[in-house]
Amino acid sequence: MAHDLTAAKVGRLALPAWPDAWYVVARSVDVGRGNVVDGLIAGRPYVIFRTEDGGLAALDAYCPHMGAHLRNGQVVNGKLRCPLHHWVIDRDGNVSGKGARPGRRTRVWPVAERFGLVFLFAGEGAAPPLPRTQSDEYAWTTGDPVVLATDWRAMMVNGFDLHHMLTVHQRALTGPPRFSRTDDGAMRLEYTTRVLPGGGFSSWVVKRVARDRIHVSQTCYGATIVLESDLGRVKSCAIFGFISEGGKARAYTAFGTRRSGFLWRLRLWITRWCFVSFLRKDYAAIEGMLLTVDDIDDPGVRNVSTYLRSLPDLGAQRADG
């Protein structure tokens, strides 16, 4: 009998299924000019379209006229045209068409692009600050999205699981981890590791570059992790965006390195390769995981669980509404 991975045990005080946060829903390259993509956040359907001038807009997925799904619409003169009666909706949600009353509108969703990724906010109130890096000097590339048969919260918690750094990645902490809240309300973890033998070729490469010390700062923005690594001679960054999809979890990734010197493109390729090799080990370990965070002594898991529990749950708000 198949497990329902959406019903994972997540502790006596449950982690929110849909924390009130920005979600990565696509890569920028997947939303070309004139394209429309659609999806669900907390059971609420949306569409995103890119206008001819490159701008993005996000709307409720159904036409306010008779409810046709707008994923089949067309982008015409910077507006989204319904496939049924050709009512059109602009980026601000203004609706026009035969029989449309003056001032008619549909809901607009906050949407933004960073790191080569598309972020969407589904909450009812003001959007929180977007995930950000501590440096603006990075050049970016994205990875292929990965879908795993697990709860997305397992992927988030795994990112802050300090004990698994040794058992899965052969990395040993050289001192106690440090936890803090950023000025925009996110949770930050900082630590330093050294590379142990047995991690494979990618670990050997990292050890040669890092001279056996890797300083890491990673920040949780609800459904997104921003991880910045300082290897001494090289500084790099990775973005991990998680979202629930049909009882599974989809992970979006972006990788950055500083755009300096004539070898920055090679460094960017190596950065992506090292991070992807690192992630493959995590994916293999948590595939099919039924998450539980009761009685966990790992400080990273405890802190990220506490932080996630502090965020409102969009799913609960949706049910109450």
Image (spheres, rainbow, N blue to C red):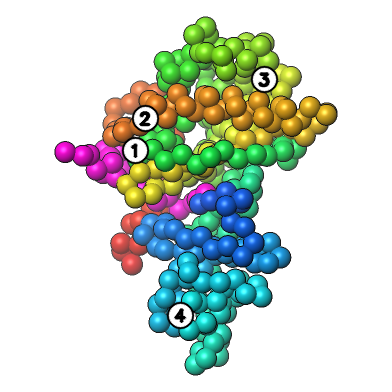
Secondary structure under badge 4?
loop
Measured in 3D between alpha carbons, the distance from the residue under mark 1 to the one under mark 3, in whole angstroms, is 31 Å
Measured in 3D between alpha carbons, the distance from the residue under mark 3 to the one under mark 4, in whole angstroms, is 55 Å
Q: Is residue 18 visible?
A: yes
- Mark 4 and mark 2 lie on one chain; the one further toward the N terminus is 4
Write down the residue under mark 2.
286
Return the x and y of residue 304 as percentages of the image width and height. Answer: 44, 35
| Secondary structure predominantly adopted by residues drawn in magenta | loop
The quarter of the picture where the C terminus appears is: bottom left
Which residue lies at the image location 46% right of the left edge and 80% below the top edge? 84
- Mark 3 and mark 4 lie on one chain; the one further toward the N terminus is 4
Which residue lies at the image location 52% right of the left edge and 91% below the top edge? 98
Verify CB contact (< 8 Å) between mark 1 and mark 3.
no
Q: Is residue 306 visible?
A: no
Highlighted range, magenta: 1-24
Write down the residue under mark 1.
150
- Mark 3 and mark 2 lie on one chain; the one further toward the N terminus is 3
Q: Is residue 26 above or below residue 154?
A: below
Write down the residue under mark 3.
231
Write down the residue under mark 4.
84
Secondary structure under badge 3?
loop
Secondary structure under badge 1?
loop
Measured in 3D between alpha carbons, the distance from the residue under mark 4 to the one under mark 1, in whole angstroms, is 38 Å
Q: Closer to the observer: label 3 or label 4? A: 4
Which residue reaches farthest right?
261
Measured in 3D between alpha carbons, the distance from the residue under mark 3 to the one under mark 2, in whole angstroms, is 27 Å
Crowding at mark 4 (Cα within 10 Å: few <14, some 14-19, many 20+): some
The quarter of the picture where the N terminus appears is: top left
